Amino acid sequence: MAQVLTTAQPTEGDHGLDTTGLCLLSLDGGGVRGLATLYVLRGIMDRLNHERENRGLPYVKPCDVFYLIGGTSTGGLIAIMLGRLEMDVDECISTYSNLIAEVFSEKKHWLPFNLLVTVQSRFDSKKLKVAVEKVIRDRGLDPSEQLDNGQERGCKVFVCATSKDLYHIKRLRSYKLPGKKDDPVTVIQAALATSAATTFFDPVLIGTCEYADGALGANNPVDEVEAEAADLWCPEDANLQSLVKCFLSVGTGNPGEKPVGDRVDQLASTLTRITTETEKTAIKFLGRWRRAYELKRYFRFNVQQGLQDVGLEEYKKQPVIQRASEMHLDHYEQVSKVKECVGNLAGKQNPASPELQVSLFTALLLHEADGFIREECYGRGQLNIERLSRQLVPMEQCYINLGIIHQLGERPINPPGPQTSEFSLQRRLKVEGPIEGHRIELPALFDPRRTRSGDLKSPRRIFIRGRAGVGKSTLCKKIAHGFLNDMLWRTLFDRILWIPLRNLRARESRDRYDLTELFRDEFFSQHPKRDSLAEVLRNTCDKAGGGNSLFVLDGLDEIWQDLAPDSDLSRFVHYLLNCPNIIVTSRPSAVLPIHVDSFDLELETIGFRPEQVREYVRKVEPTRAEEIQSFLNAHPLIQSLVRIPIQLDALCYAWDDILEDIPDTMSDLYRIIENGLWRKDLGRLRKKVEGRLVNEKQRLYKTQVRTLIGDERRFVESIAFTGLYNDVIVFDNRFRDLVAEHFDPPPGMLDDFLLKISYLRASDTRRGEQNQTYHFLHLTFQEYFAARYFVRKWTENGTMLCLKMSKRRPRMMDARSFLREYKYSARYNIMWRFVTGLLRAECNDQGDHIVGFFNALQEEPVDLLGPTHERLVTHCLNEISLSETTPAIVSLRNALEQHLSKWLVFQCTRPRSWLPFQGPITLASEMEFPLRSLLSSLREEGDEFRRTLLLSMPPERGVAPPVVKAITSWISVDISGHLANTLVNYFMRTLRSTFLEAKCVTYLTHTLVV
């Protein structure tokens, strides 16, 4: 999440902005045509109040809706009436009509210039003053009333006047602006100054400064309104657009005039040059506010037809102005704009409410905080998913599959049928997933669910477990992306706060842990108002219900071991975990601390479904999709592996190498991927061949690549093995220092090297090298490199360095002793697979090393009573290709398969009372049990044995053609009733998945009919 300061833009559906965001009103100048402004505004306000009435809300005036009204010339006069004198639009129309009739009914001079050819006023300024004084008195105010009388109002008003001598636009305000010192000005003076149009009225003297009509410099005052609002609400960064709910600009139907001199020759040229100023200003402003316009937050209404012949002083043409204005709003091009504008304003709270005024600054500050998080933490590419090739993957191609473990107090859900052991690779990688009915789509995460008592309740506290590489980080990005771009859960939450918990480690030197510190460091470290934004966000989250904030606490497993019972960190993590609205992600190893509130929903992330694998390959590798899918169809084990997203990406990236050396086993696949990724890294590691830097596209022999990266690979092996030995998958600086102390790191800066290795991922690049943590692309890559370390020591007859983080001195062991001690440890069961495959593939010794390895597996201690040993042998045997021709290895394989077949027969015929074997038939239930061993077992006699074996097989294994053929051979007239029923159920289960022989179909039909 980058912390670069830019201008945040408003986004659609922003709830805080929709209720408390700024509403601004800008009014053009235009003499009598100011009535057009009022008729347009009346049309909008009438529709708004009609909508509010339908919602049961009270009637509002413009001063109840707009926080700031700014006007020029007669637009300034109207601004004072609507905002400072708090008239409604009908009152303002009536008052303004009487005022212009009084002022423009009689001309003081018929010509705009005198005998000296200097400009003179054609109307009596005294009449204007008297008319304005009457307006003020009619509102119950004294004529000497100050524009800013010190009273705080919900609606602020300013008018534009132009300093005649300095050609400087002056804003006359009804309020105090921090940092600005304004001369005292009365309401009358402000009204006369902004209305003192050259050739119409005399300039107005305020203090020692002479002012003319504000239209001289800003006939369309949108720029002035924008600048004034920025000075009021965001003076530090002028980031106004992110705070504005509605900016309404209303014109007078014809451009204003802006003479800058007193002589007629100057006047004529100036009038010609300025006739289009009003609309040019509008066009330029729209260019800057394009995003707000597209989001229906900026509106401009200006009558286009019917007022061209209405002069600034022709008050008798009021009916023409009214008719043209109303026709403008009813025009088909304007109807939708009016509706959108009214819809925007309809959700606005009353700014005159004292309670709302007190919280306005807080609300705007909170919106600024939300905007900054949205744009700088979740925008600018922060939610991109990058492939190994460094290409970006569109978010819609990032599939997230979630399965329900338990919900709303229910017991954990276990799928029915044969249970696979945790030694099963598919089970370990969580690619099997729950049954279909227990899957949940991401948009439905917070949908109401029925509790055990029958009530409907929306989950607000969700715990999601998932193994490394299965997509937890992608899930967090998908959650943020869905909330911001797809409007997910916008009715439930105002913001999403994604907190990688690993970052709390970087704050270990802090005196305290609290939300303010967390928000400042995590989100606002690069913002000039970091302290204020962090505090306002903290105060919001402390409110009842969490202030509609959804916390996404990512990676509990990366910090839970550090939670000492009485530490500040532990107390703070407890506080976060007890927030009312949270999603917590973790690897399965994490244990929830005590005194944490229960979760409403517990889920697990699972791998891609087969159809998603196909779709991903088709989109990412369109030209090679068919051959990749054909390869996967022919290799079921690898097909399971690539249901883990990072594994699938690695396979696609290394596909060219795979075509050169088709892998038969998981180890073969990882060896090919390893070579491809090292070749990719050669350039970043600045490796040279014949004195020239290697580039990624340069084709090198595998032996060349291995030679070039020898030191780097050995150090990666050391990290992987030491991590596995300590059950550590996230490598912090303390871990790296320990490994570097006992193993030889490659030359140069250690972190610089680690950041260039494709197998490793930096947890958070913003934390700096000293606080950086790393992890392998997937746990299986760590297990693969740990296996490489073991194989190196096995073939060298070397000593293994076993470092414990909790001990100062390492434990020294030979490889055979290590195997004897840890061969049944679940932590290493995948590593032993890779050890078998690497020994077979890389040791040119006629099979001596691999035979020696299996012989060592048979050494004491051996699990003679349970199936653990046979499972280990089964999984290691899968790493020996069926195409293997080395005599010693072929002989070994045949002997092991015969042993496993006998063991399976023994399991299926054991006495039921033999306690060590109570439970499921784990060998037959695993897809990786050797097919030849299974077929050999299927030839055994005995109905009860066959029934037990049939019930234990998974459906996927049972539809293999050789298995179907072997089972079909059991059909005879004298089979038992129990076996007959089991056969019927079996055939029904496989009917959709495979071709059944005629004998099988006949038997099934006959049995069902009978």
Image (cartoon, rainbow, N blue to C red):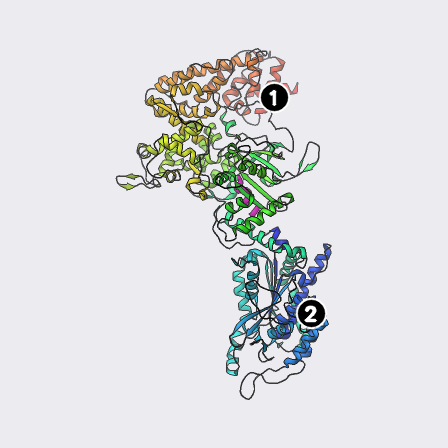
Above or below: residue 68 compared with residue 773: below
**Which percent across, then down, holds residue 1000?**
57, 20
Query: For residue 404, which quarter of the picture?
Result: top right
Viewer can see residue 1006? yes
* 683 horizontally vs 371: left or right: left
* Main secondary-structure element of the magenta-colored stretch: helix
Which comes sooner in the sequence, label 2 or label 1? Answer: 2
Q: Marks 2/1: CA distance? A: 85 Å
* 913 horizontally vs 883: left or right: right
Mark toward the viewer: 2 or 1: 2
**How many numbered marks appear?**
2
**Which percent across, then down, holds residue 943?**
58, 12
Give the SS element for disc 1. Answer: helix
- Please give the residue where the numbered disc 2 appears in the rendered image: 92
Foreground residue among 851 and 189: 189
Q: Which residue is most to the bottom?
A: 115
- Please give the residue where the numbered disc 1 appears in the rendered image: 985
Q: Which residue is most to the front?
A: 511
Question: Which quarter shows the C terminus?
Answer: top right
Question: Label for residue 41?
Answer: none
Q: Which residue range is magenta in the image?
A: 475-492
Above or below: residue 595 compared with residue 348: above
Question: Which amino acid does the dot numbered 2 rest on?
Answer: Cys
Question: Which amino acid does the dot numbered 1 rest on?
Answer: Asn
**Which percent across, then down, holds residue 894?**
42, 16
How crowded pointer 1 is (Cα within 10 Å; few <14, some 14-19, many 20+) is rated as some
**Which percent across, then down, holds residue 528?**
50, 53
Query: For residue 882, which quarter of the picture?
Result: top left
Viewer can see residue 276? no
- Residue at (44% x, 22% y) in the render: 876
Foreground residue among 258 and 358: 358
